[in-house]
Amino acid sequence: MNHSKSGFTLIELLVVLVIISIIAGVAVISVKTNSHRDSELFAHQLVNEITLAEQESLLRPATLGLYIYPDHWAFKRFVDADKNHPPSWQPIFNVRYLPSKLQLTLKNDQTENESGPDIVISPGGDLTPFHIFIGKKSQSPDWEIIGKANGEVSYHELNQE
């Protein structure tokens, strides 16, 4: 009698299920790590751009301002009034857009001025003290950027509990 088997044994099915679950677990961990890494890279990029603006302010010399909007940020240079134009803030670098999953929250001691920048960088190396919090939308922030009046800018990870 020649019996031919068709199908898989129970052991073979269990081995395949274990392999699939291991791969799925690694993928979930990788996605969580990558999304956290995105906010870290963004914080690092913004700190570098603020530092670059400080150097630009010293080299020109010019007063620069950082404007922070819900979906982008921009650096502008203060231009004094002349015969034909009032004083104004003019764009200096390209506008930068936030990744769609991230949000910025700015906190500083400066009173809100609708026409002026959120952060002012002076030619002397000083800037408006500030805290910028970075995180995913509708979640607590992962990173904080701190700007001190003496021009020092740094960032660190916030403790997640």
Image (spheres, rainbow, N blue to C red):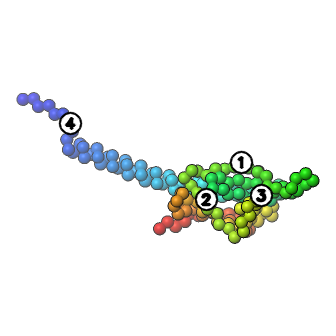
Give, as a three-letter code, the residue at label 2. Answer: Leu
Lateral position of residue 47 relative to residue 138, left or right: right
Q: Amino acid at mark 3?
A: Leu
Q: Which of the 4 quarters of the picture holds residue 52?
A: bottom right
Q: What's under tag 1, amino acid-wise?
A: Asn
Q: Residues within 10 Å of mark 2 (few under 14, many from 20)?
A: many
For the point 67% across and 54% down, the residue is 73
Sequence-wise, which precedes: disc 1 or disc 3? 3
Could you give the CA–CA distance between mark 2 and mark 3, rounded to whole angstroms? 20 Å
Could you say whether the residue bearing mark 3 is in a helix, strand or loop?
strand
Q: Earlier in the sequence, mark 2 or mark 3?
A: 3
In the rendered image, which residue does mark 4 sit on?
A: 7
Above or below residue 133? Residue 75 is above
Spot occupied by residue 29 in the image (x, y as percentages of width and height): 43, 53
| Dot in front, 4 or 2 | 2
Q: Which residue is mark 2?
A: 104
| Residue 94, disc | 1
Numbered label attached to residue 122: none
The outermost residue toward the left is 1
Which SS class for mark 2? strand
Task: Sort mark 3 into few (<14), some (14-19) or many (20+) by Cα contacts within 10 Å.
Answer: many
Q: CA distance from mark 4 to mark 1?
A: 62 Å
